[in-house]
Image (cartoon, rainbow, N blue to C red):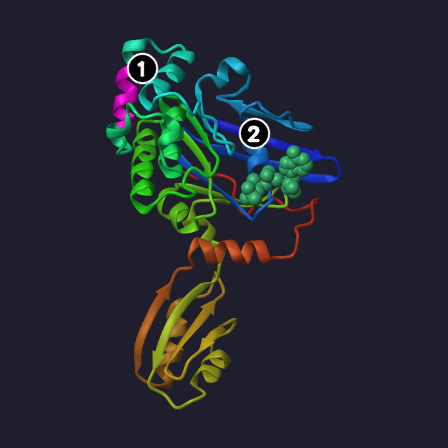
Amino acid sequence: MLEIDRLSRRYGDVVALDDLSFTVRPGQMYGFVGTNGAGKTTAMRIVLGVLEPDSGEVRWNGTRLDQDLRREFGYMPEERGLYPKMQVHEHLVYLAQLHGVARITAVKAASELLEALALSERASDRIESLSLGNQQRVQLAAALVHDPTVMVLDEPFSGLDPMGVDAMAAVLRARVDAGAAVVFSSHQLELVERLCDAVGIIRAGRMVADGSVDELRGDAGHRYRLAVGAAAGWTASLAAAVPGLTIIDDGDRVALVELPPSADDQTLLDAARALGPVHQFTPERPTLAELFRSVVAEPAPDPAVAGPKKVEVAR
Ligand SMILES: Nc1ncnc2c1ncn2[C@@H]1O[C@H](COP(=O)(O)OP(=O)(O)OP(=O)(O)O)[C@@H](O)[C@H]1O
């Protein structure tokens, strides 16, 4: 298990990380999201040992990370670093060999990755001749070619076309299903929601929500889209009849309403039926983007008492 334990880091007066903790298990894909400047890159750079924290530590299976342990990691940094003059396949083999992989194994691994990332035809091309998106695919291959057990990827999906996203997602999912731990940062929340087993939302260097998307939804109220054949003003009657009900969107016939997390939806249905025939009663699950906006818009937590909303995720 990868444990990021109470990391704090300042750049002069800027607090980039403030007591940040989260864990990523083997066989888990963890999406690391946050607004611009929230601290994601800083945290990833600390995990990879290119930046020291002011306090806190990172452990893998209980042992504090050192350069030996980090050789088991695959890293896709924010600053992409490939040699532009090298050929694609040759470059991957070279990087795998730097990690101690035997040449014959490296050649095979590089070919398989290029195939999976739809780059086989570019294997003999120089890196500099590839488009940015294709260079990014090679960058992912570079992070994986030595078969790491942990992958730390800084915005691996940014700038990729939909086919590139699908190819990269499939490669990562296969590694996770084989037992690797993957953490990646992204601003593409639909993608994170689709791919990740767990999500951490960071704001101003602090973890403000951590868990599976379903668990994060559990903290939100329960929303229903309701259509009732009743005279105008029925939503006000409904709100009066159901304790804690919030009318989110008051359409003429169809309304979006929210019950508090502990409320019983049958009470809502009964109250609606008392007003007229119910033509629609559909639960609406907030998307990760909606959860993100609500979490990020909340007032800043009190550092003395606040922790993340959820810490543990079962898979
Ligand atoms: N080398 C640096 N010197 C000074 N401040 C820095 C440095 N690197 C980052 N920061 C500051 O630390 C904070 C966290 O930055 P970081 O790059 O970790 O955020 P991020 O979540 O990765 O952002 P983005 O989504 O925009 O990539 C920001 O306020 C940033 O301006």
Nearer the observer, 116 or 311: 116
Say whether disc 1 or disc 2 marks the residue closer to the N-terminus: 2
- In the picture, the disc for residue 84 is none
Q: Position of residue 1 (x, y in %)?
A: 46, 26
Q: Is residue 47 magenta?
A: no
Residue ID for mark 1? 106
Residue 268, placed above or below residue 302: below
Specify whether tag 2 is near ligand 1 (CB below 8 Å).
yes
Residue under the image location 48 percent in, 21 percent down = 61
Mark 1 → mark 2, Cα distance in angstroms: 26 Å
Residue ID for mark 2? 45
Q: Which residues are magenta?
A: 107-114
Q: Secondary structure at mark 1?
A: helix
| Circle 1 or circle 2, nearest the eye | 1
Q: Is residue 110 magenta?
A: yes
Disc 1 and disc 2 in contact, CB within 8 angstroms = no
